[in-house]
Amino acid sequence: MTDTFRFPTHLIGASALTKAEAAYLELRSRILDGSLEPGSTINQERLAADLGLSITPLREALRRLEAEELVTLRAHKILSVVPLSRRELHELCVVRASLDPLAATLAAQEATAPEIHAITALASRPRARELRDRLSAHHEFHHAIYEASHNKALAVILDQLWARTDRYRIIVLHSHSFNQSTNAEHRKIAKAIHDREGPAAADLMQRHVEAALRTVEEMGSRDLDGLSP
């Protein structure tokens, strides 16, 4: 097959990306937003044709997704999107509720002045109209705190956990109102980080994360009846 990768619109101009990197980002996005449905089985050759790629960069992208436990590969050509499960959702919630407060504590201690300014600005943005835009803004705020913790291992782990949680969050919340108090909670967390109050930032973050994830878990129990135990 001629390797004529069609960069997705949101990746056009990202000339530094290799075809494997661009394919990874596009497929990861499709998995996380539900375009590639949980539990679905997809033929690699058809997917390569859809992306305009040869099989080699596609497999490189799929290996990265497999390492993130977003897909499973078998028989060399067949890939399955990892299905959702109540057990995974609960485990993600438990870990996030422990690690996000740690990131907030470290950010209060280690963040630079520009990082604090960025966190404050993200917390102060008007609430977006569309659900996906609100979820994106929510992630940007938390990601800024992860980066401001100046602990790369923690930031990587939390970003991966966030992505896996959003598989549930997007599916569950698409027909529900997003938490109206999120912006106010973000502003309180940002102020605690600005004031270098680590314990307060951790406490506010823990309550914020536990409340948000509890909502996802409760909705998941009610709305995701097809999930495995």
Image: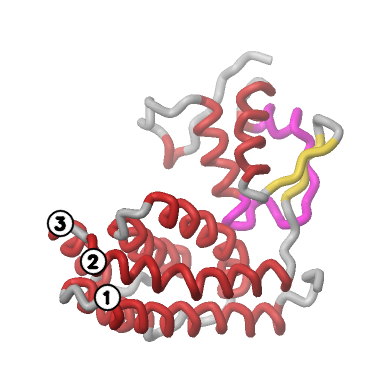
Q: Read off the residue under disc 1.
A: 198
Q: Earlier in the sequence, mark 3 or mark 2?
A: 2
Q: What's the distance in space between the residues labelled 3 and 2, CA to CA? A: 14 Å
Tell me if 75 is positioned left or right of 54 in this view. Answer: right
Quarter of the image that includes the N terminus: top right
Tell me if 55 is positioned left or right of 39 in this view. Answer: left
Q: Residues within 10 Å of mark 2 (few under 14, many from 20)?
A: some
Q: Residue at x 37, y 85 (%)?
A: 181
Q: How many marks?
A: 3
Tag 3 and tag 2, C-beta contact below 8 Å: no
Farthest top residue? 2
Tag 2 and tag 1, C-beta contact below 8 Å: yes
Q: Earlier in the sequence, mark 3 or mark 1?
A: 3
- Amino acid under disc 1: Gly
148 is within the stretch colored magenta: no
Specify start and end residues of the magenta stretch as a single range.
31-50
Tell me if 57 is positioned left or right of 155 in this view. Answer: right
Front-most of 184 and 197?
Answer: 197
Tag 3 and tag 1, C-beta contact below 8 Å: no
Q: Read off the residue under disc 3.
A: 114
Q: Residue at x 71, y 82 (%)?
A: 221
Residue 109, which numbered label?
2
- Amino acid under disc 3: Pro
Question: Residue 53: image x %, image y %?
Answer: 62, 24
Front-most of 130 and 172?
Answer: 172
User: Which secondary structure lies at badge 1?
Assistant: helix
Residue 212, which numbered label?
none
Question: Residue 10: image x %, image y %?
Answer: 42, 42
